[in-house]
Amino acid sequence: MTTSVSVAESDSAATGPEPLLELSGVRSAYGAIEVLHGVDLVLHPGSVVALLGPNGGGKTTALKVCSGLQPVTAGEFRLAGRVVNGADASQLARLGVCSIPEGRGVFPNLTVRENLWVATGTGHSLDELESAAYQRFPRLGERRSQLAGSMSGGEQQMLALSRALGTAPTVLLLDELSMGLAPRVVTEMYDIVGQLAAEGLSILVAEQFARAVLPIATSAALMLQGRVVRSGDPQEIDRELSTSYLGG
């Protein structure tokens, strides 16, 4: 297995014909219980891939594999064409992979400004991070001295996104972005995700509620019982989806 991939190699490979991120026949397990059974998934540069399916289908585990939090037991995890099986979260972060987990992942007892300060370890100044965050989300500027845990779910998600973008990622992994948010806020957040993709960011979104993400997705994959059972054009998959398990 290979984990010594340089950022320069990643950037160079990403401009070629190969996918930026790829799972090929990936299996993964929690102890003796295998939860991914040969998953194939492809994320191309500048694209938004919607990973769809009901709870328990394996979406979160697939994202954990992509972020280095869950080991690959078989198959290959490739980043910019290089096998990175065994790379941990910190190594993948240095290669440009950033993850926003289910539940937003902000520090509730820190202010907005202090949450952004956490991302200064990536080499960007707090002034730069604040300027970018408040320009994209003016509400965060109004709440810069407020404890993150006292803000609404949508505002916390804006903060999580701003902090993630402060690391200048190449790949952004989003897990259930819509969880706990009002429909209007969900639409607003996915509009932002679409803008980020238009700016060149490659995004993999695990989402139970397909209709929330499909309008901005460039491709979609349906995951059931630890397997990708269908992938392709979002509109085609949208027509085939059963609203009984994807939430309409």
Image (cartoon, rainbow, N blue to C red):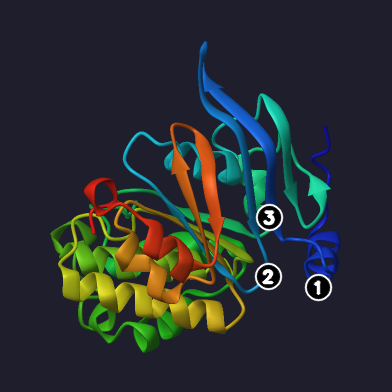
Q: Earlier in the sequence, mark 2 or mark 3?
A: 3
Is residue 116 among the parts visible in the rendering?
no
> Which amino acid, by three-letter code, is at mark 3?
Leu
Residue under pointer 3: 21
Q: Residue at x 66, y 24 (%)?
A: 73
Residue 39 in percent (x, y) is at 60, 38
Residue 106, quarter of the rendered image: bottom left
Mark 2, other Cα within 10 Å: few <14 / some 14–19 / many ≥20: many
Which quarter shows the C terminus?
Answer: bottom left
Residue under pointer 1: 15
Quick one: which residue is furthest to the top in this view?
32
Element class at badge 1? loop
Residue 21, quarter of the rendered image: bottom right
Residue under pointer 2: 45
Q: Nearer the viewer, residue 173 or 142?
A: 173
Q: Residue at x 50, y 70 (%)?
A: 165
Horizontal relation, residue 76 to residue 152: left or right: right
Q: Nearer the viewer, residue 66 or 234?
A: 234
Label 2 – label 3 distance at C-alpha? 8 Å
Q: Residue at x 34, y 60 (%)?
A: 210
Which quarter shows the N terminus?
Answer: top right
Is residue 200 among the parts visible in the rendering?
yes
Q: Residue at x 48, y 36 (%)?
A: 61
Label 2 – label 1 distance at C-alpha? 8 Å
Q: Earlier in the sequence, mark 3 or mark 1?
A: 1
Q: Earlier in the sequence, mark 2 or mark 1?
A: 1
Element class at badge 2? loop
Q: Are marks 2 and 1 in contact (CB under 8 Å)?
A: yes
